Amino acid sequence: VEWRGGAPFVVTPTTPIVATGAEARRIGRGLAALIGNTVDTTPQIVEAATEPAIALRIDPGAGHGPEGYALEVAASGVEVVASAPAGLFYGVQTLRQLLPARVEYGAALFRPLPIPAVRIADAPRFAWRGMMLDVARHFFGVPDVERVIDLMALHKLNRLHLHLSDDQGWRIEVPGRPELTRVGGRTQVGGGPGGFYTTEEYAGLVAYAAERFITVVPEIDLPGHTNAALASIPELNCDGRARAPYTGTNVGFSAVCVGTPATDAFVADVVAALAAFPGDMIHLGGDEVKELSAAEFATFVEGAQRVVEATGRTFVGWDDVSAAALTPGAVVQVWRPQVPAVARRVAQAVAEGASVVLSPSDRIYLDIKYDADTVLGLTWAGLNGVRDAYDWDPAALLAGVPEAAVLGVEGPLWAETLSTVSDIEFMSFPRLAGVAEIGWTPQTARSWTGYRARLGAFGPRWAALGVSFYRSPEVDWAPDGVE
Ligand code: ACM
């Protein structure tokens, strides 16, 4: 970032957006919708302009990589240049953050809108910058998930991991298996009505995310965390008897019967259902299985991995799967780096060719309470304050796991205690912004002091968006209001 001083660029009611090509024009329309709030004030998208304009350019030869961009703001014009559409989208998100926070209000607002003169060259440190949403413990409908996707996009996050099944609920249709949603889709923690995504709704979410350069990583948790499936399909149980639905919050008590034709057919159907949607990864959980022997667990994971890989997708599992033999290229999501035996197994898996996504539960589990007074959330991993969530280096978390093996970072949000989108927002923000910055910014350019100041300045933007963020006392929050 190079602050140039001098006069800002000023967006007026006649400022056009210059963009050519379908993707640049589509990204331009997103910016126009932000800057304009009525038909009369929404900027025109044009091919060329003589007056001061905001130019959005995709130039495959520009050398910014798949997600990088360059942004120049001067009094005479704004230009965002990227090598690929994702980079242009991220450049526009940065431009958005340079505009006054009041652009985020849906209500009518006044012009002009100043953008400070600056030169920025930017690209992410890690390819995987994610959030996980648990829609199984409590179900969140399509509008709630779209809200999460919108907020992820503002923070340049690019992976939404959906935890689509657990003991308390099954949340996605599987062709030929209507009982999964008819039975398993009707429960949730505390006994509420639950819910599930139809194939069309889920496809819509995947597309909504893709328009914002976010890839959905679907997770069906197996072989444990499966009571909803065991209640729906009797043959998945070794005794052939359906389990009762479960709406409590215990873990570790359920597992499918390993090595039976019924379970193998079930896994094949589930993986085929997930592989029918656009995407590159399939997450099959693997965590907290206490009801199987070590041999049964390894047999299951190794078989499930083969089923996923046969579809051309990459297999992802929680760090528990490092107890099985993983193929090179598998992705291990690390949630217990603080447990020495887990850390050793993960390092071994990396030595054998696995990559990792880092979700340390004592840092960036977003459902862990911020402090002792947080009303929502859990405490089994301690307390994850705003600084704790930010102030660590992915390359230094695990011995034997160098930066090259780290795909990126992801903040999981488990929903045992969360039932509304406001609850999601309260636990996610500000900590998810920290995850985004860890994922994007080189370690040498990060510091708690600098981040803390920038977070404080970001508060009015969340407020304008109606985000129920936690005004942690660790941060000096700028006052809300229209500047
Ligand atoms: C987990 O928190 N059980 C992955």
Image (cartoon, rainbow, N blue to C red):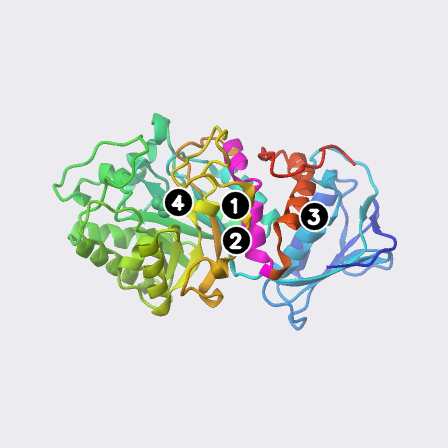
Q: Quadrant of residue 110?
A: top right
3D distance between C-alphas at marks 4 and 2: 25 Å
Residue 81: image location, x then y, percent = 70, 63
Query: In terms of depth relative to the viewer, which is nearer, 95 or 173?
Result: 95
- Disc 2: which residue: 392
Q: Quadrant of the C terminus?
A: top right
3D distance between C-alphas at marks 4 and 3: 30 Å
Q: Which segment did they paint magenta?
A: 422-443
Q: In which quarter of the image is residue 2?
A: bottom right
Of badges 3 and 2, nearer the viewer stands 2
Query: In terms of depth relative to the viewer, which is nearer, 185 or 131?
Result: 131
3D distance between C-alphas at marks 3 and 2: 24 Å
For the point 65% across and 48% down, the residue is: 449
Question: Residue 388: which disc?
Answer: 1
- Disc 4: which residue: 163
Question: Residue 313: which disc?
Answer: none
Task: State which tag comes first along the sequence, 3 or 2.
Answer: 3
Which residue of the protein is positioned furthest toward the bottom in this rendering?
A: 61
For the point 67% across and 37% down, the residue is: 476
Give the residue type that dot 2 points to: Trp
Task: State which tag comes first along the sequence, 1 or 3.
Answer: 3
Please state if 375 lies on the left or on the right of 93 as rendered.
left
